[in-house]
Image (cartoon, rainbow, N blue to C red):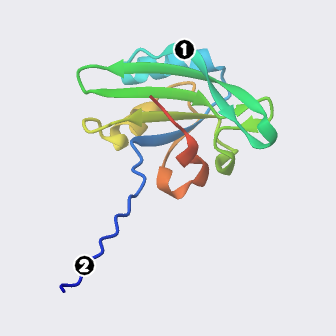
Amino acid sequence: MAKKKKHILSFEEAVEFDMIGICSHHSDYRLAWNINTSLNIHLNKIENYLLSGKKGIETAHSMYEFSDEEDRLTYFLIKNKQDGHYLIPEKSAIDYFLFLCDNCAVEISDVLAKLKTASSVLGAYQFAPKDIASAQNVVLT
């Protein structure tokens, strides 16, 4: 009788977004306006991003969205700290995160360069989501 081969499938969770941390002392709507001007996009305020934290505490983080039909990608701007709770606690010095979902057309280095010219942006930094444990919990659709 022939031996049966055993195949084991393993799946890696694919991170479907690029992640940019932004430091800014301005409010979310003013930052969004400056980002819109710098990147030539149109971020719009949408329903807050709900995050269930430890001990069942739910926080609502301010969120903006823009869908780029031409490049087939979506931008999300989310406030990191809300009511003492962080979206990405490992990066508590970052005020906002800009996520580029399903990005195949835009160079992140170009986005960073343009963001750094915005008057509301004190600093912009690219992060690898796979290196940040809590980034795996961010679900953007």
Residue at the spot 48% in from the left edge and 27% down from the top edge: 76
Whether residue 83 is visible to the viewer of this picture, yes or no, is yes
As drawn, 31 above or below 114: above
Quadrant where the N terminus sits is bottom left
Q: Which residue carries the number 1 mark?
A: 46
Q: Are marks 2 and 1 in contact (CB under 8 Å)?
A: no
Residue 125 vs residue 97, the one in the foreground: 97
- Distance of mark 2 from mark 1, alpha carbons? 54 Å
Q: Residue at x 66, y 20 (%)?
A: 27
| Residue drawn where x is 50% and y is 33% of the image | 98
Seen from the viewer's position, the closer of residues 39 and 10 is: 10
Image position, residue 2 (x, y; %): 18, 84
Q: In the image, what residue type sits under mark 1?
A: Ile
What residue did someone put label 2 on?
4
Q: Please state which amino acid type lies under the numbered disc 2.
A: Lys
Q: Quadrant of the C terminus?
A: top left
In depth, the one of 118 and 66 nearer the eye is 66
Residue 70, quarter of picture: top left
Looking at the image, is 139 positioned above or below residue 72? below
Q: Viewer-proximal residue, 103 or 125?
A: 103
Q: Where is residue 85 drawn, in percent x and y?
A: 76, 36
- Residue 62, x across and y down, in percent: 63, 22
Label 1 environment density (alpha carbons within 10 Å; few <14, some 14–19, many ≥20): few
Label 1: which secondary element: strand
Q: Position of residue 138 (x, y in %)?
A: 55, 39
